[in-house]
Image (tube, rainbow, N blue to C red):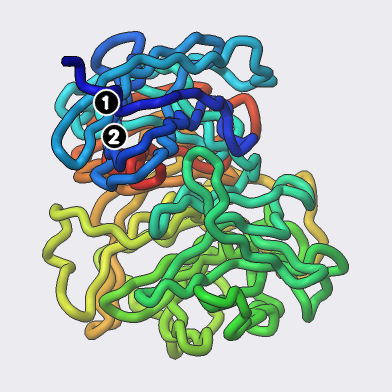
Amino acid sequence: MNNPSLIETISVTVNPYDQNLLSANINISSTVSLKFSYIVNGKTSDVDFTYSSEVFTTNPVIPVIGLYANTINEIDVVVEDLSGNKETTTVYADTTGQDYGDVALNINIEILDETIAKTSINNGWLMTSYFNGYDKNGDIRITGLYQWGTTPLKTHDGSIIAGDNIFGYYYATTLYAINLLGKVNKTINAPDGFGFHHDVTWDSTGNIFVLATMLEDQTDSNKLESIVAKIDATTGEIIWSVDYSEQFYNSDVLANSDTNDVHINTIDYIEKLDQIIINSRSTCTIFAISPDDGEIIWMIDNPANEVLDESKNLTAINDFIYPNGEHAVFLTDNTKYDNYSGDNQLVLSVFNNNSCLNDDGTDNVRKMESPKDDDYYAAPVDSQAVILGIDLTARTVERLDTFAVTGERSELRGSVFQNGDNYDVFFCDAYDFFTLDTNNTIGVRALDIETVTSYRARIFSYDELRALI
């Protein structure tokens, strides 16, 4: 006698949340509880996308990512009941005829070092800040999520942060915590007249810290991109907000900065110190604040320019070269720098744009409140990823490492993210992406990967992709 089928009916809904065009829900009708696994069959077997759930559910809805564009995708599904009975079936998800706009459906990803690639692109997807995700063959596997150009590409508690991009390219009036199908898990709304920008972070209790700005009518006393706010993780209410406009009054800024633009572009939580790192691109200042009230604790500020607070400025040692117009100032825990792993020490990775230098290597600056001269000079210096070692007991900072690719420059944007023992570096002038090891060896290269003004790119790992479903 044949065993009865575990599946009564099965259907596929492509793009169920009207977001990720290359996603689907597989809808199963069953009379018993089932767990499941699936394989989205890749164009080559090494890019099959697999996923499984150990949760038993009646009438499971199976979330699928990793479809191909303009393809009738084949998905092998296995379900199993509580008695261990299994059933395998194949379903199809049709993405033919979808409108992808001007998004590249395939890019050229070069693997130049197999050892580096093995722990990066071979087990993940390259994701841009427009949520276009590509596998190792260069085929797009995610596209269509919320199009916010300054998406930070950070994840937390099964979600990635996106924005609505309603107020121009840079600012979002609503932030969404979403999964990779586009299902919204949480929303955070900015107060009227304000917008979010650039970056977010979370403390150990899940409270979210955001960068905010007035959307219009900036003044000397109410500057652009100058606000940090702490938001309650449960209620979404603002716990505190600090506008740092006063601290930056009459400060020296890079000549390519807009008038009254503090341009705080990074925020990252340092759990072992219970401190928040933020960064001003305009003044080239990295500083730490208290998560309790936003008070500035210490900073790294070039003494050749106007220093925000000399009493809190760390001492540079070992021929330290200050960053210039930096982005993406994040905590890094690469084992190469374990000599800075003490209780009162930390290591930061920084994308050093070398944004606006004079030919002699000094910062080309003017006062923040003065008009921007559109004919400013910026020496054509290569951008870098740099590693900074900070000792808060000795109150010192030094440069531990520098990674660069000859001829690559990113004057106003760019990113560096730790990727295992390596670093993903994105140069925005040409939209060129590299995975580098700490010997500056290029393992993965993808040139001209974006047709729009993207801020960041990094590889999402095997585990990270699955945690976001």
Q: Position of residue 75 (x, y in %)?
A: 37, 18
Evaluate whether residue 12 shows in this view.
yes
1 or 2: tag closer to the N-terminus: 2
Identify the residue shown where x is 41% and y is 82%.
298
Picture layout, residue 9 above or below residue 212: above
Q: Position of residue 25 (x, y in %)?
A: 48, 32
Residue receiving disc 1: 78
Q: Are marks 1 and 2 in contact (CB under 8 Å)?
A: yes
Between 206 and 363, the one lying in front of the other is 206
Between 263 and 186, the one lying in front of the other is 186
Q: Quadrant of residue 19?
A: top right
Q: Position of residue 38 (x, y in %)?
A: 31, 26
Secondary structure beneath label 1: strand
Three-letter code, disc 2: Phe
- Point out the residue furthest to the right here: 217
Residue receiving disc 2: 36
Picture layout, residue 148 above or below residue 445: below
Within 10 Å of the Cα at label 2, are there few (<14), some (14-19), or many (20+) other Cα atoms? many
Cα gap from disc 1 to disc 2, whole angstroms: 6 Å
Within 10 Å of the Cα at label 1, are there few (<14), some (14-19), or many (20+) other Cα atoms? some
Secondary structure beneath label 2: strand
Three-letter code, disc 1: Val
Evaluate whether residue 432 shows in this view.
no
